[in-house]
Image (cartoon, rainbow, N blue to C red):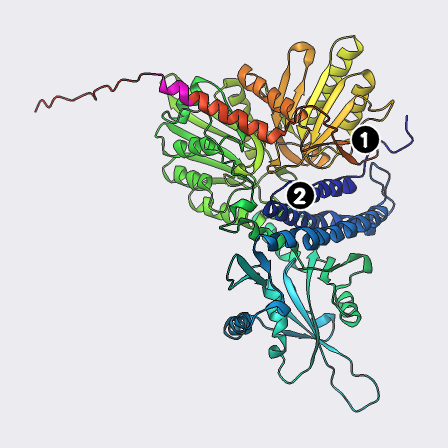
Amino acid sequence: MSEEPRFFNRELSWLAFNQRVLDEANDAEIPILERLKFLAITASNLDEFFMVRVGGLQIQQRKAPDKRDPSGMTAAEQLAAVSERTHEMAQEQYRIFAEEIEPQLEAADVRRLAAESYSQRHLYALETLFDQEIFAIYSPQAVADKNDFPQLTNQSLNICVQLAGESDDSEEEPTPRFAIIPLGREAQRIITLHSDGGYAYTLLEDVVELFVARFFAGIEVQQSATFRISRNADIAVDDESADFLQGMEEILGARKQTACVRLEISSKVGATMLQFLQEVLEVNDEDVFKSPGPVDLAAFMQMTDLPGFDQLKYEPWPPLPSPEVDPAASMFEVISRKDVLLVHPYESFEPVVRLIEEAADDPDVLAIKQTLYRTSKQSPIIAALKRAAERGKHVTAILELKARFDEARNIEWAKDLEQADVQVIYGVRGLKTHAKICIIIRREPHGIQRYLHVGTGNYNESTARLYGDISYMTCNEELGGDATNFFNAITGYSQPQDYRKLEAAPAGLRDRVLDMIETETLRKRQGQKAHIAAKINSLADPKIINALYEASQAGVSVKLNIRGICCLRPGVPGLSENIEVINIIDRFLEHARIFYFFHGGDERVFISSADWMPRNLDRRVELLIPIEDTPSRHRLVDVLDVHFRDNVKARQLQPDGTYARFDVGKRKLVRSQESLYDQTKRAVNQEEQYRRTIFQPHRPESTTIDES
């Protein structure tokens, strides 16, 4: 067995994932606006990485400098490795932007103009814009030292201006003065310019810097530079707080004052200005990122939906109506006939929304109970829950206020729902409620019936068009009973329940997964066939990794499709030679969690809200749901199989931590997301053909005789 550590480092594994996304931005086979989108995603990903992971490592370095992670690295060692890797990544981002994306956009008549490229017409229009709007909106703030440095918003754009110092007739060089012009996070960054053809634009900061001297009449402006800071966001609310909602609001305020963990600044910055900013922000050299192009590449996401340039984007793959759902029937009729499994985004999320909307309006529905982690800005599901409560139904919403970076929205939703008489529970003390479940209690002729939706993704109809997820709808009585117990355990003071079908974290989910892995290991040692397959976002839990290593050593075939972090080291002789790990980055974000165990031929298939991470299994409320009806189970196995046959977008994790593309040779090319979309189209077409062959006579409506 190799002497290498048994585990990859979590942070470096995540950075390897972001590199694979960046590789998509560098792929000449992808339409250019889609490449720009991948580039913007990598920049946005790094923003969160610095705020959460780097901020957390810096805290650990101060509090527990000798503590080592499972890969054997201290916080200081991780920070050094992260700094080196992120600087390399930033350089590659700007190389791709300057050498690949912008030239190809310009060839397609999409041009970014800098000050030296403005025509006289542009100059006149921009000068007018500056005088009438910019000058009136933004205010410079003079800064002498860090005591009067403005409280800059996290990840907002700013301009630092270096002004000539006041001369006192001494022979010493006057000390420069500085001012900061905050542009804010919500500034209209992209400014459209007149163009005789195509599309031309410039950036707000370029316009401000062009006319910046007008802010400082009578003072010499020596230099200006655009910059941006990232603050540590790895702070948590005190769960013992008497007013949890107020505590969360205080956390949002506290994030505005946390330490700076990264300074991004234009590479044209002079040494004097940079030294000043580093001193007032207390930033080390390794935390400074000089940008040879526009600061904050994530802002270019808004350019990716440029109207009139569809030829520069992917061919549309809109979500399709599920052939499992009869559009003429109510969702209660559909689910009462058979369980329904939806594979998003190939199939529309609309049936899930329709189920909750119908429940809000149906007079036979008595209660709705639902978890909410992340929702859309104008959520129809939130609107339906409010409407249901206003109509006298008992509505319970477990709304997780600690959903990172969605806290503010969830706080507003919580207040809004409470105003509508919804019973709002702010999650579970000490845990995040990450489970995705809704149960509807309905009075029917035979008695009370429970309708259940569970899923791997959020109740967000917008991201359901972009994320690969699973929805499952059923009126299975045992699952319905488990769901009722689950909600009662969260909303009351009861202990975690013994469930008949599902499992929940942090109580039993890990144990159930470990038991299934160990069962496959035992069967293989007894000479039986054994196989494990899983599709998850991240794998970092040492207990599960060690169990998979034992399974591999016993000869169990283990196939893992892991989008992001993978701390398991595959393909190591004597340790993990029977484990294969692939990763797929494509136009849709792979987000579904599907687990498969051969189980002696009696195949066991599960979906889950949980990744195999300590945070999911120990510090979150999560669900693991068995899929037992045969058509749904077979379909999930097929979804797994299609992903493992991908040889176009899939990459295989090597024992050294690198990822390699498959050598296709003469084999048929398989792009899993395209295959799944084509499968869905064929199923929809077949269903339409079937429905056209059924004769449905019009029946006269019944009449009532007026006996008066």
Circle 2 is placed at which residue position?
28
* Quarter of the figure with residue 686: top left
* Nearer-the-camera pick, 245 or 528: 528
Q: How many callouts does the rendering have?
A: 2
For badge 1, the amino acid type reads Arg
Quadrant in the picture for residue 135: bottom right
User: Residue 72, image x and y in percent?
Assistant: 86, 38
At x 58%, y 30%, the residue is 674
Q: Considering only vertical position in the picture, is 498 above or below 425?
A: above
Q: Nearer the viewer, residue 277 or 373?
A: 277
Q: Is residue 483 left or right of residue 284?
A: left
Type of the residue with mark 2: Ala
Describe the element under mark 1 as helix, strand or loop: loop
Q: Position of residue 419 (x, y in %)?
A: 43, 47
Q: Residues within 10 Å of mark 2 (few under 14, many from 20)?
A: few
Viewer-closest of 427 and 285: 285
**In this picture, residue 188 sits left or right of residue 540:** left
Helix, strand or loop for disc 2 = loop
Q: Quadrant of the C terminus?
A: top left
- On the image, the x and y values in percent for residue 42 come to 67, 47
Magenta range is 688-694
Q: Which residue is mark 1?
A: 569
